[in-house]
Image (tube, grey):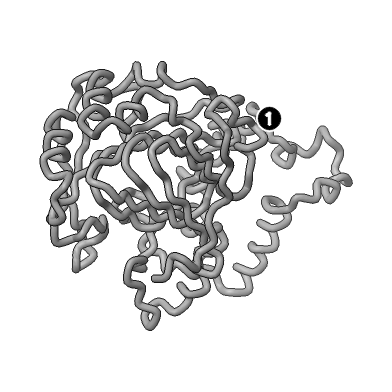
């Protein structure tokens, strides 16, 4: 695949992590803040050496075993399904972090190294003092902050509901990004069975088969690419598809995930699953009728279309939906699902 033809993510320079404001965080397209966290202690250690970065991370570690994954050298770093698509090509283990780091450092220069990585690992539980070194806060957000560690790997394109501020602490990473509406051109696999728990694209981005996946060529027309060095921060808006490629023998990433609405509204993927259960098997004419209802009640941005209803009678149609009304609606739905 010719990466040179893919448009780069908009880069902003001379912005520190303190300067990343709410206006920037509300961007609907990805932004790359070059060098924005380069002054963080762990980044400075990574610039010295991988060993120094590893020791710095261990100095914040609580000692509780972490979830680590191992893949044979033959997978070439691609975390994916097995050949029968009834399992995955990596194995999970619970290990002390020291053992994972020891393995990574011992094979960091090995061209035939196995794939070794620690996925999303919550800082509050495993690295509670690490965040004290950061010099920024996210206004009006309570992010879930996690550490990612590993060597060369390719995580297939997927989306996350939360917005993500990804801080590259050590090594180099490449993000290949697609707007949410490109889902139909990415050939997404099963909803309920995926390596990271989130549905992924089945296209091998390194060697795409355009005979098997012809619409992927259209997806590439809308793709963006971001190359991250130590100290760079990527803003990844909610719902954007992204493949993540860790390119060096020792990589360290810190992510901040947050949602733009209160948790009492529930998870949108629950609504999707319920819609699949209730609507997908209906006759086409009925599905189209329900599509019109969803467009009117859920996706309609013209608030004046409901002006004919008095405020006191709008109930679940009130925007934004008050917490008490949301909890009432949730309770009603739970009771109906029990029938």
Residue at image position (52%, 73%) is 218
Q: Residue at x 42, y 70 (%)?
A: 2
Quadrant location of the N terminus? bottom left
- Residue nearest the observer in this picture, 47 or 190: 47
Task: Give left or right: position of 263 versus 83.
Answer: right
Q: Residue at x 69, y 63 (%)?
A: 292
Q: Nearer the viewer, residue 100 or 13?
A: 13
Left or right side of 260 for 187: left
Please tell me in which quadrant of the rendered image residue 149 appears. top left
Q: Is residue 45 left or right of residue 228?
A: left
Is residue 267 among what the camera can see? Answer: no
Q: Nearer the viewer, residue 333 or 44?
A: 44
Taking the image as shown, residue 48 lies to the left or right of residue 142, namely: left
Label 1 crowd bin: few (<14), some (14–19), many (20+), radius 10 Å: some
Q: Which residue is labeled 1 in the image?
A: 322
Disc 1 is placed on an element classified as loop
The count of marks equals 1
């Amino acid at each position: 695949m010719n990466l040179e033809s893919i448009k780069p993510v908009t880069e902003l320079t001379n912005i520190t992590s303190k300067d990343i404001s709410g206006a920037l965080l509300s961007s609907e397209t990805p932004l790359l803040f070059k060098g924005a966290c380069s002054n963080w202690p762990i980044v400075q250690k990574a610039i010295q050496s991988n060993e120094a970065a590893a020791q710095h991370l261990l100095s914040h570690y609580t000692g509780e075993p972490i979830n680590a994954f191992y893949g044979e050298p033959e997978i070439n770093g691609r975390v994916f399904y097995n050949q029968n698509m009834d399992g995955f090509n990596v194995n999970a283990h619970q290990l002390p972090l020291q053992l994972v780091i020891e393995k990574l450092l011992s094979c960091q220069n090995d061209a035939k190294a196995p794939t070794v990585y620690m996925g999303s690992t919550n800082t509050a539980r495993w690295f509670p003092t690490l965040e004290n070194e950061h010099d920024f806060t996210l206004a009006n957000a309570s992010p879930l902050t996690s550490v990612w560690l590993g060597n060369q790997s390719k995580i297939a394109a997927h989306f996350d509901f939360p917005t993500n501020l990804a801080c590259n602490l050590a090594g180099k990473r490449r993000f290949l990004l697609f707007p949410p509406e490109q889902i139909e051109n990415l050939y997404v696999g099963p909803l309920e069975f995926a390596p990271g728990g989130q549905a992924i694209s089945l296209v091998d981005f390194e060697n795409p088969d355009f005979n098997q996946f012809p619409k992927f060529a259209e997806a590439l027309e809308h793709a963006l690419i971001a190359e991250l060095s130590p100290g760079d921060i990527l803003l990844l808006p909610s719902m954007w598809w992204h493949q993540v490629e860790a390119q060096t023998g020792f990589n360290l990433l810190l992510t901040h995930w947050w949602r733009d609405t209160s948790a009492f509204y529930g998870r949108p993927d629950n609504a999707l699953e319920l819609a699949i259960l209730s609507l997908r098997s209906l006759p086409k004419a009925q599905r189209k009728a329900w599509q019109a209802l969803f467009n009117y009640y859920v996706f309609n941005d013209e608030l004046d279309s409901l002006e004919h209803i008095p405020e006191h009678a709008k109930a679940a149609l009130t925007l934004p939906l008050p917490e008490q009304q949301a909890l009432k609606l949730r309770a009603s739905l739970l009771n109906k699902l029990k029938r």
